[in-house]
Image (cartoon, rainbow, N blue to C red):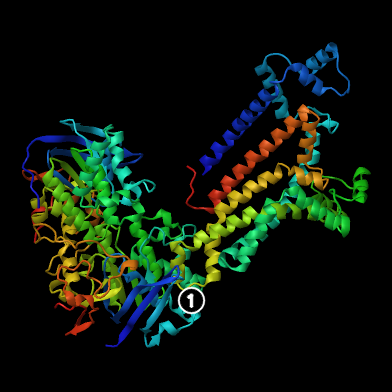
């Protein structure tokens, strides 16, 4: 099946002061129609920045150094500002991480949802309100509350409002950045089930998270990112049950499962900042299996349906 | 999984309830916390877990009785290390503060020694002492918060969601640290988290809080391996296993039941409407507030 | 919300009593004789008999609480006493001078809001460009120049050299019309009165006289409003919800006009409101330079001539304006920010 979205060898640099620092390096991601793809990694791994670059919402000091982002055959990196604005919210939508602050506090939620349709000239005002009510019903928000303000809703409800805003224009791809962090388990399950329903409508979702256990039941494909690079990728059950890359193995090890009894095996140290990116394999500072070979950057190796970046496998 | 072998009670809680204006943040809480127990309090936002911690620490007004059967020093560690550490103070001063203010120690040598020991115990380097909080990572800041608590040798440590704002891998390090501290000192811990897997790893006993009420309580082994309440089952389903899980359904029932979970419960039926919402004894220490408990475990 | 209003309205008289009490007690720290000489018309030193007459007449001795309550009951009825400075009752003086100040204040605050808002928003969107730097520098520079210098320079330029504008509130012709009874001052506000009198010449004349002083005020004080607009806008631009708006595909103009603008209203109302209140209490220096017959110049004259009733009247009026102004600001907050619920 043809890919809906393909990110090819994307590299992004940040300009801080007078120097350039590499944030994302040679990242390639493929998303098929009706697929849920997860990007998993610790904070600072570059997963949010990679996905923001798809719709070109990067901060002013970040720039795409090289690479292409192909969406339905079009190269998004080559589009004008006006053309990419037409895609945002309509073909590709983004659900941000902090439901508390992601909504305008002084405007009611009905207006905030309806304006997507109105500004993209999909519906007139009356029709837009009708569709807004319908979508609020779908995501489980009591429709009597549609004229209320964000602070009148709980965290879980606000997350649903964000999802409603992302769904209303029938996008082909939805990018959800940590959609379930800070939500309780029941709401988490409800929201993930909602995402699954969306997938069933043949829409694609990119799920970004630092918590691999959340996506184990909900994604088809996983990309594991560390310090701006893809360390490993493959089908979900293969990654979970048969991880290849040391980082993936350690990540899975640090998760508590019912089978675990003794001490949790954690990853030594912490993720380096962008000012301290090591030479060679980026995981070298924390990898328990490192060898002399690792001072040279390992290439991305393909093995059956999977990719990984390590010398010692 | 830890087990508590002590029998001496240290905190006795009887009929604890906390009411705000027109709703109960906590209701009907009866607990006997033993010395050297690690009590895991599993609850989500709105469950009353923070109110519970505040009531025990004495900073919240409550009805009922909380008795300490021994003179105990209590210390509190919060969820967000960025807001619990004073950004204008160096790490050394942050850890020093309770020694000067609470313990009233004046001897500089003793203070120095205690601080250095505390820093080592939490696995940090002493050259961090001269830094400011914003120069530290989330995990390091949380370790500083722990050091600050440990330095006064508390008897009871209350940890309120201390790993929730950290990445999984960093949180795991903190859990390991807490386990080490527990095994080294004679300390009672109340560990609050919405993440039941963390409680599985670190607690000896667990209570499940939902909207201010205890739905299930017991030894960790019983609760995790043999859960009786549907809500507990949902929480456990979020723990990663290598086998593929059934998708849990979250219902939207209209009920007349007194059971506080009935509107979301997948096991709800008409019999629940007659349920008086009392705590039922399953075995010693294992209690559940549900009449459907027979048919839970797969 | 209703409860909040009721509570505030109940507090109004209490605050008022507090202010008047403090005022009264401060004035009465002066001995009765000193107060008496302030009340007299004559230049020469008064005999003790004459002093006693005055003390009797104006009730300047005796139990202070009783006197305060007596005085307060007069104030409430609107009797502020007699003003030496203007040679009429204080309440008449207030009726004469206050509208002039209010009219000037309103005429000045409108360009401050409109132009200040425009400049501030533009400076924020063009942050760090030449436009931003020039606007910032110019407004700060003008703000730091003492207001009388701006006033004098403007007067010198437009009156002295170019002869386009003249000081005072209206021309001599209008003055004659008023004193001869052909122009009725219904409200004391020249613009409204000239419309009511259907006299468009006077209308134009009044507006012409308002332009220079209000421009002087605008130049000297708009910097704060421009700065708060600019800085609040920059703060909003970095907020998360703006990122969401961009992700929805909305264009920058729309984001500013519909969304950001509503979020900067609270700081704007605070700063603009306080500025308005300050203008209402009479920009004394501007009034002095442009010979504007406002409450500010009245207050200063009264103080200089130890016109005690005049000064007290002035303080009470200005305090009342301040209290009411703050109440209005609070109400505006609640109207514009749905998160604020006064319970």
**Residue placed most toward the observer, C179 or C309:** C309
Q: Seen from this angle, which residue lies furthest top?
A: C49
- Write the residue at 14% across / 59% down: A264
Residue ID at (33%, 51%): B131
Q: Nearer the viewer, residue A148 or C64?
A: C64
Q: How many labels sit on residues? A: 1
Percent position of residue A185, x then y: 24, 58
The C terminus of chain B lies in quadrant:
bottom left
Nearer to the camera, A161 or C54: C54
Q: Is residue B158 left or right of residue C198?
A: left
Query: Which element type, helix, strand or loop, lies under badge 1?
Result: loop
Residue B287, placed above or below residue C239:
above
Residue depicted at x 22% and y 61%: A269
Residue A114: image location, x then y, percent: 46, 68
Q: Is residue A170 visible?
A: no
Q: Which residue is under mark 1?
A: A120
Please tell me in which quadrant of the rendered image residue C127 appears.
bottom right
The chain that hosts pointer 1 is: A
Residue C243: quadrant of the picture: bottom left
Question: How many neighbours does mark 1 have within 10 angstroms: few (below 14), some (14-19), or many (20 or more)?
Answer: some
Left or right? Give the position of C322 relative to A166: right
| Spot occupied by residue A183 in the image (x, y as percentages of width and height) | 29, 58
Residue A29, visible in the rendered structure: yes
Left or right: B32 as drawn, with respect to A55: left
Q: Residue B226's x, y, as percent?
A: 8, 54
Is C317 located above or below residue A12 in the figure? above
- Of residues C80 and A39, the one nearer the viewer is A39
Q: Residue at x 46, y 74 (%)?
A: C249
């Amino acid at each position: 099946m043809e890919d809906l979205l393909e990110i090819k060898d994307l590299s992004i640099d940040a300009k801080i002061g007078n120097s350039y620092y590499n944030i994302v390096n040679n990242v390639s991601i493929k998303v098929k129609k009706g697929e849920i793809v997860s990007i998993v990694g610790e904070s600072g791994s570059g997963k949010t920045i990679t996905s923001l670059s798809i719709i070109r919402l990067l901060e002013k000091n970040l720039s795409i150094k090289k690479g292409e982002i192909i969406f339905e055959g079009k190269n998004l990196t080559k589009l004008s500002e006006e053309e990419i604005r037409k895609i945002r919210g309509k073909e590709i939508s983004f659900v941000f991480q902090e439901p508390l602050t992601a909504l305008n506090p002084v405007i009611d939620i009905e207006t905030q949802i309806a304006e997507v349709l109105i500004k993209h000239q999909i519906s007139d005002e009356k029709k837009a309100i009708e569709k807004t009510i319908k979508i609020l019903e779908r995501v489980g928000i009591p429709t009597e509350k549609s004229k209320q303000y964000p602070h009148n809703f709980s965290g879980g409800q606000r997350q649903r409002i964000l999802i409603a805003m992302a769904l209303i224009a029938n996008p082909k791809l939805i990018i959800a950045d940590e959609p379930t962090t800070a939500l309780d388990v029941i709401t988490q399950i409800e929201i993930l089930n909602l995402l699954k329903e969306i997938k069933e409508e043949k829409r694609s979702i990119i799920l970004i998270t630092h918590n691999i256990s959340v996506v184990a039941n909900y994604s088809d494909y996983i990309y594991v990112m560390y310090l701006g690079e893809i360390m490993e990728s493959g089908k979900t059950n293969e990654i979970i049950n048969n991880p290849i890359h040391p980082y993936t193995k350690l990540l899975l090890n640090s998760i508590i499962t019912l089978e675990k009894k003794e001490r949790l095996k954690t990853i030594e140290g912490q993720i380096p900042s962008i000012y301290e990116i090591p030479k060679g394999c980026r995981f070298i500072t924390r990898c328990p299996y490192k060898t002399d070979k690792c001072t040279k950057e390992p290439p991305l190796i393909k093995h059956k349906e999977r990719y990984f970046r390590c010398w010692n496998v | 999984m830890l087990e508590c072998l002590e029998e001496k009670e240290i905190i006795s809680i009887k009929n604890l309830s906390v009411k705000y204006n027109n709703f109960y943040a906590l209701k009907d809480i009866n607990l006997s916390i033993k010395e050297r127990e690690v009590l895991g309090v599993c609850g989500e936002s709105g469950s009353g877990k923070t109110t519970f911690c505040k009531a025990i620490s004495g900073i919240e007004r409550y009805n009922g009785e909380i008795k300490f059967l021994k003179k105990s020093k209590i210390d509190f560690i919060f969820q967000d290390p960025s807001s619990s550490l004073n950004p204008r103070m160096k790490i050394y001063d942050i850890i020093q503060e309770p020694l000067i203010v609470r313990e009233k120690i004046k001897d500089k040598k003793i203070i120095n020694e205690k601080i250095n020991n505390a820093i080592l115990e939490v696995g940090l380097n002493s050259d961090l002492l001269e830094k400011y909080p914003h120069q530290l990572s989330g995990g390091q800041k949380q370790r500083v918060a722990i050091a600050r608590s440990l330095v006064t040798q508390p008897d009871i440590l209350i940890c309120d969601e201390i790993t929730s704002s950290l990445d999984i891998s960093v949180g795991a390090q903190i859990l390991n640290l807490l386990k080490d501290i527990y095994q080294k000192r004679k300390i009672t811990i109340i560990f609050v988290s919405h993440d039941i897997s963390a409680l599985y790893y670190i607690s000896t006993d667990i209570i499940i809080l939902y909207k201010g009420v205890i739905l299930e309580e017991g030894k960790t082994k019983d609760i995790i391996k043999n859960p009786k309440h549907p809500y507990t089952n949902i929480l456990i389903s979020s723990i990663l296993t290598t086998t593929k899980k059934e998708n849990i359904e979250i219902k939207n029932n209209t009920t007349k039941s007194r059971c506080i979970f009935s509107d979301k419960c997948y096991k709800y039926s008409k019999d629940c409407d007659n349920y008086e919402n009392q705590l039922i004894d399953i075995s010693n220490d294992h209690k559940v507030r549900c009449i459907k408990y027979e048919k839970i475990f797969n | 919300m209703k409860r909040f209003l009721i509570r505030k309205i109940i507090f109004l008289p209490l605050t008022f009593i507090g202010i008047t009490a403090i005022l009264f007690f401060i004035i009465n720290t002066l001995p009765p004789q000193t107060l008496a000489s302030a009340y007299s018309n004559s230049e020469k030193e008064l005999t003790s008999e004459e002093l006693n007459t005055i003390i009797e007449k104006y009730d300047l001795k005796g139990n202070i609480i009783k006197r305060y309550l007596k005085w307060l009951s007069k104030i409430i009825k609107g009797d502020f006493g007699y003003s030496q400075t203007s040679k009429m009752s204080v309440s008449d003086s207030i009726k004469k001078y206050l509208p002039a100040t209010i009219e000037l204040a309103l005429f000045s605050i409108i360009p401050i809001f409109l132009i200040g808002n425009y400049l501030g928003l533009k400076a924020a969107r063009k942050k760090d460009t030449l436009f931003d730097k020039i606007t910032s520098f110019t407004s700060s520079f003008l703000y730091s120049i003492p207001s009388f210098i701006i006033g004098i320079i403007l007067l010198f330029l437009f009156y002295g050299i170019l002869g386009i504008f003249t000081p005072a509130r209206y021309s001599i012709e209008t003055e004659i019309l008023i004193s001869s009874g052909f122009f009725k001052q219904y409200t004391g506000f020249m613009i409204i009165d000239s419309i009511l009198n259907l006299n468009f010449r006077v209308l134009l004349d009044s507006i012409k006289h308002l332009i220079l002083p209000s421009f002087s005020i605008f130049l000297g004080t708009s910097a704060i409003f421009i700065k708060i607009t600019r800085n609040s806008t920059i703060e909003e631009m970095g907020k998360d919800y703006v990122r969401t708006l961009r992700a929805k595909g909305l264009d920058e103009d729309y984001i500013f006009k519909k969304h950001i603008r509503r979020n900067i209203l609270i700081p704007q109302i605070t700063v603009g409101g306080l500025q308005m209140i300050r203008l209402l209490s009479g920009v004394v220096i501007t009034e002095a330079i442009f010979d504007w017959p406002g409450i500010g110049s009245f207050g200063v004259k009264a103080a200089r001539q130890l016109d005690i009733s005049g000064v007290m009247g002035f303080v009470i009026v200005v305090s009342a304006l301040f209290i009411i102004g703050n109440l209005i600001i609070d109400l505006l907050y609640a109207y514009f920010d749905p998160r604020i619920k006064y319970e």
